[in-house]
Image: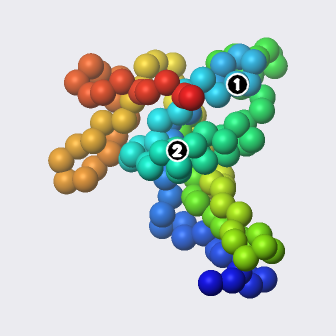
Amino acid sequence: MPADSTTTIPDISRVESVLVQVDARGKVTEASPAYALSPSLTQLLNASLKQMIRSPGTDKNGKPIPSQFVMNVSLQSKPSGTGGYEVHFAYVSSKPLPYGSWYWAHLPGDRLALSTGTTCRPIPRFS
């Protein structure tokens, strides 16, 4: 179906939470979506994060430091003008995390939590 001039509004109820770690140079070193994405969506997520995150966190004195946080993103699309669509993940919100080695824990009843224990899978490396 050809694209029209209407932009698709993101469905905020379909927000993907992503655990993100950024080094002191501002480079995303790890990203772990709360729920598995297809390989093509994982690649799109990684590209979107690289575009969104370009600087490190800073301490109270302005010194660059590594940081970790949960970023909520939503998938957005708009007509490309050539009959297709441009698709990307867009920023919705974020929350910082205290220092530690965090990962997603999937709990009974389709519940989700962040954990620092050793009972769940480790966060995969960002590629």
Number of numbered discs on residues: 2
The image quadrant where one finds the N terminus is bottom right
Mark 2: which amino acid?
Thr
Name the N-terminal-most of marks 2 and 1: 1
Q: Residue at x 73, y 24 (%)?
A: 26
Q: Position of residue 95 (x, y in %)?
A: 57, 40
Q: Quadrant of residue 47?
A: top right
Category of crowding for the residue at label 2, using alpha-carbon neighbours closer than 10 angstroms: few (below 14), some (14–19), many (at least 20): some
- Asked if labels 1 and 2 touch by Cβ distance under 8 angstroms, the answer is no
> How is this picture coloured?
rainbow
Foreground of the two, 46 or 2? 2
Above or below residue 7? Residue 100 is above
Q: Residue at x 78, y 28 (%)?
A: 55
Q: Residue at x 78, y 83 (%)?
A: 5
> Residue 27's mark?
1
The image quadrant where one finds the C terminus is top right
- Left or right: 94 as drawn, with respect to 108: right
Residue at mark 2: 42
Secondary element at image label 1: loop
Mark 1: which amino acid?
Lys
* Residue 120 visible here: yes
Q: Position of residue 37 (x, y in %)?
A: 44, 48
- Left or right: 100 as drawn, with respect to 11: left
- Left or right: 26 as drawn, with respect to 124: right
Q: Position of residue 113 (x, y in %)?
A: 34, 40
* Residue 93 visible here: no
Q: Position of residue 69 (x, y in %)?
A: 56, 34
Category of crowding for the residue at label 1, using alpha-carbon neighbours closer than 10 angstroms: few (below 14), some (14–19), many (at least 20): some
Secondary element at image label 2: helix
